[in-house]
Amino acid sequence: LADNALQCLHDEDYDRPYNLQNLNAETLIFTRGREGRSLDGEWNFCVDLLDTGLRQKWFSMLPEAPEKRIEPWDYDPYEGETVPVPSCWQMLKEKWYFFEGSAWYTKSVSVDELSPGRRRFLRIGAAQYDCKIFINGTFIGNHYGGSTPFCVEVSDTLLPGQNWVMLCVNNTRTLDRVPMRNTDWFNYGGVYREVALYETGSTVIRDVFARLSDNGICVSVVADGPAEDARVRIPELNIDAVVALDGGRGHIAFKASPERWSPDTPKLYDIEVEAGGDRVHDKVGFRTIERRGTELFLNGKPFFLRGISVHEDDETAGKCTSEEDLRRRFADARALGCNFLRLAHYPHHERAAEIADELGFLLWEEVPVYWAIDFANPDTRRDAENQLRELIRRDRNRASVIIWSVGNENPDTDARLEFMRGLVELAREEDPTRLLSAACLVNHAKLKIEDRLASHIDVIGLNEYYGWYEENFDELISIGQNSNPDRPVVISETGADGDHTDLGPKSGLFSIDYQREVYERQIETLRELSYIKGISPWILYDFRVERRQNVFQRGFNRKGLIAADKKTRKPAFDVLRAFYAEMRKKDA
Ligand code: GCB
């Protein structure tokens, strides 16, 4: 037993040794095209409200039959209750519905001895919000950020035979996190995306970034290990070249004119990269996205974003998503006539962008820099920057993603401007090929878009709720006239709640009839505003949230065009569909 296994440390100190944030964008490995070994399935599980596990070092108690124990354990990591991974604990048992704190996941993992020169990595698709990893009693890493993947090398820690992998996942909302304490989506917890082990040679490819360049395609590779070069192949374009790695980094440009990816022709090319025997594979589309003045251009052609916002939320699975759920989402967006989705307000499952690539949808992806996070706190900034970097590195080969958004409705303070300009710079460094946006602020007294961030981004996102939180639609016209924006504006949110059930009112606020009327009036007004280059109304499906508790909401934000059952369409759906059919004709 470890020294102080059953003693309590000082309250403020007990978790300090484990909050290293040493698992971050730099420790990711590229996993597309790799065969992993899934560690999904049943894991032992225990909620731990008081963080007794970290204080008593539960992870250091290796399995022993109860009758042989010499210490009175407060926990049995190796037997007892199990839960499936991936999942959100709130959706599994009623007693966990509002649980907020640490929870322990334990799994026995047997592995063979690694052949000389081979390496192993553990990857967790996402755990909300932070996750500490222990293997065979030893702490090996910690990750912050609830919606991005993280990896840790386990070549020396997973030993031949049986091992115990323990994860301590904590979903406590705190002031210094991203997001912070207050949001308008449910605070799910758990390991809610896939977990897998990957084996590689002595060199591991950590990153591949393929994109259009001035007269062709360029590819950057990051590899870690002895390999001195990497081979890049795009067979369909007859590209097959060797790129030298300098300090593990290589960059190569090819003359090529690939067919452009677009929503109408979502052409993808196979790309293979090999370094020192390590091989990855991806399917990549090539397209340009630019803004000139207040216009948006896709492959040089102006276009309008016919969008819809969507949360990662499900009545029965919570934040845990599936291929079927994602495909239904795109099918519903297609039925609506969309070419664009805003994946709000945090990175969604990586399959979302892969499917969008394949089906031909444009995406806005964002990090949860939402409302008044602690902009002056360097730890908060480090957390936000890392989440943004991880998102970009995960999805920057996805042609569907055209916009990175760095925030939503953040108060315009000096600290916020400094923080968000930092995020903008970081995003441009990581990916100079996409547009940057944020949902900006309107001064409702002056009826003007007034946000110092607006001059640092490419597309001004505007969340406006005329007909719901604001009354007078004429103000929306004045905002346009008074603001005279010099860059494209996208209405990143607009909408109204509509309770479709028998409990819903027949007219007025919260009726589906009034929701329809708001959509009609929004469309009538927005049609007049030539600087608006797209809209992504709030929202495709009703979603669960703690703060919405009136008699019509009953724990859900009911601004969905479709109810939380993901089946029942409300009348506003058809109103938006008719508008999009018209906009589509204009773009054709
Ligand atoms: C907003 C927020 C979004 C909310 C929405 C609402 O402005 O960005 O997260 O859910 O309004 O329904 O009030």
Image (tube, helix red, strand yellow):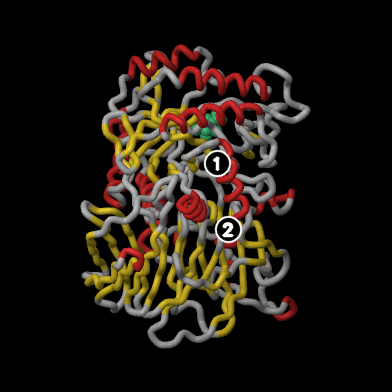
Q: Nearer the viewer, mark 2 or mark 1?
A: 1
**What number of labels is visible?**
2
Indicate whether 287 appears above or below 573. Answer: below
The picture places residue 468, in percent across and down from the top left corner, at 56, 20
Q: For the point 28% across and 53% down, which residue is it?
A: 212
Residue 580 located left or right of residue 529: right
Q: For the point 38% across and 58% down, which residue is it?
A: 25
- The residue that mark 2 highlights is 191
Q: For the point 27% across and 70% down, which residue is it?
A: 248
The picture places residue 473, in percent across and down from the top left corner, at 49, 14
Name the foreground residue: 424 vs 587: 587
CA gap between label 2 and label 1 equals 30 Å
User: Could you say whether the residue bearing mark 1 is in a helix, strand or loop?
Assistant: helix
The picture places residue 510, in percent across and down from the top left corner, at 66, 23
Name the foreground residue: 470 vs 286: 286
Asked if residue 12 can be seen in this view, the reply is no
Residue 347 located left or right of residue 549: left
**Residue 108 location, quadrant:** bottom right
> Quadrant of the image for the C terminus?
top left
Name the foreground residue: 105 vs 364: 364
The residue type indicated by label 1 comes to Arg
Query: How many other residues sit within 10 Å of disc 1, few (<14), some (14-19) or many (≥20)?
Result: some
The residue type indicated by label 2 comes to Val
Which mark is drawn over residue 334? 1
Q: Earlier in the sequence, mark 2 or mark 1?
A: 2
In contact (CB < 8 Å): disc 2 and disc 1:
no
Query: How many other residues sit within 10 Å of disc 2, few (<14), some (14-19) or many (≥20)?
Result: many
Name the foreground residue: 542 vs 363: 363
Which mark is drawn over residue 348? none
Q: For the point 29% across and 73% down, which residue is it?
A: 230
Ligand 1 within 8 A of label 2's CB?
Answer: no
Asked if residue 62 can be seen in this view, the reply is yes
